[in-house]
Image: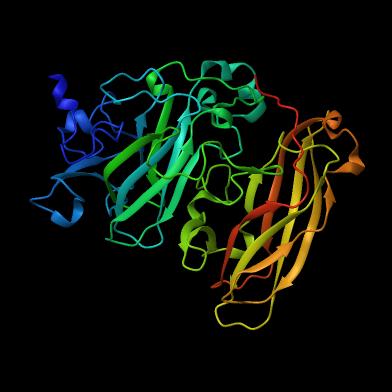
Amino acid sequence: MPDNAYGDSASFEPHNNIMRKGDMEGSESLIYSSPSSLFYGRGKNCKMSMVDAYEHPSRVKGGQKSLQIMGQTKQKAYNCWIKRDLGPSCNGRMLHNAVNKGDILVIEAQVMTEMTGKIFQMYTGHYHTAKLSDTCTNINAPSCPWYQAPNDANMVSRVALTPYEWKFVRAVHKVGGPEWFDYAGLELEPEKCNHYQLRFRVTGGATWWIDNVRVKKITPGSNVEVPMYTTPKSGFLHNPIFEYGFQHWKVGNINEAPVLEKDPILNRDVMVITGPAIRDKRLIQNIDHQEIQGGLYKYKFWLRVDLAGRTRPVQFHVGVRMGIRDDQGVLQIYNQYPFNLAIDSSPDWQEFETNTFSMFEELGDYRALGDVEYIHFQMWSTTMVADGEWRVAGFESVTPDLEPTTFTQ
């Protein structure tokens, strides 16, 4: 195939966008239909197709084509995610410019679905054979080379979709670091092009469409606005005010995850927690190896609570939960609760502070007690009404930042 078959249309900003053929303007074999295609689908009964603007103009967002990913039908259930290889060794067929450790990427896409209550997710996948050593026995994972450390450093974006409305998704992501860790926290740089991937999916068996995927590499002096050139950190928290989207953050069931929305009062993205099982949803960050044993911490944060017309306050909590696997193989759980307070519904943002707390000082050297599997910083409500909503605008340490001893190589 001639080399120019991989070029982008003139209107697709080739000088700014390093991803080739994100506009989906190409043949089936080039875009999706084989493992060597630019956007290849994986998962159970994966079925994809090209959509032509002449036949379905509302299902294409610019240009003449978009990519359709089939969901559940009366005859069959499809469960498909698609991937795009981004490894440092990817050649000009995949990218105009290689992606390397430490790069800051602005990732954009246009997405649409047919069903209500669905969430579009972008995240990265990382492969390395060195993960095969003892990882399988430690985490009981069937595919150890693809193992991801449980800190959500590989999450790029989660966005709520409205049926049959194109959603413009834009997220900032830093390459490497924790998203390339193995089980022991060793950073393993991907060796081949397909060993580092950008992945896309929509939850819950919906049919969806994607178009105009762009990846822009940001360097100092660029005219593309990003918050900063290093991952922000406050105390032991990475990405404390969600400037880098969902990187390092998660909430329980991936199909019931929160979303980021631009708040009209603050004029920036905030985390929104709503929907089914809202009382069980915890905003979580794994702070393992970012904390100092016995260190003193205190955080302030901003909440906006909507109780859907109810007048009674609801109970909110901030806590730290640590899981240690002891010598007998038993997972021992330790908890701290530096914030417990009843909060009223309000259309305004409210500022709160935790109590000052030590990082499990009473345990002494807790890493001598066994293998620390996680240390979760968490926020949740135990009495939130089912149709309510709470928003958090971020966290700020109000104690001097303590620098943990690095455990990466």
Number of marks in the rendered image: 0
- State the quadrant of the C terminus: top right
Q: Residue at 26% of width from left, 37% of height from top? A: 22
Looking at the image, residue 45 sits to the left or right of residue 264; the answer is left
Q: Residue at x 71, y 64 (%)?
A: 352
Residue 53: % across, % down:
12, 50
Its colouring scheme is rainbow
Q: Is residue 58 visible?
A: yes
- 407 relative to 206 in the view: left or right: right
Residue situated in front as seen by the camera: 241 or 15 = 15
Location of residue 102 in the rendering, given as x and y in whole percent from the top left corner:
50, 28
What residue is at 29 percent from the left and 35 percent from the top?
16
Above or below, 372 relative to 247? above
Q: Is residue 7 above or below residue 306?
A: above
The residue located at (38%, 27%) in the rendering is 86
> Residue lying farthest front?
221
Q: Pick whichever, 18 or 22, lies toward us.
A: 18
Quarter of the picture holding the N terminus? top left
- The picture quadrant where one finds residue 302 is bottom right
Would residue 78 be visible to someone looking at this image?
Answer: no
Please, which residue is most extreme toward the left here?
54
x then y, percent, for residue 158: 45, 50
Image coordinates for residue 323, horizontal then vertical, percent? 76, 40
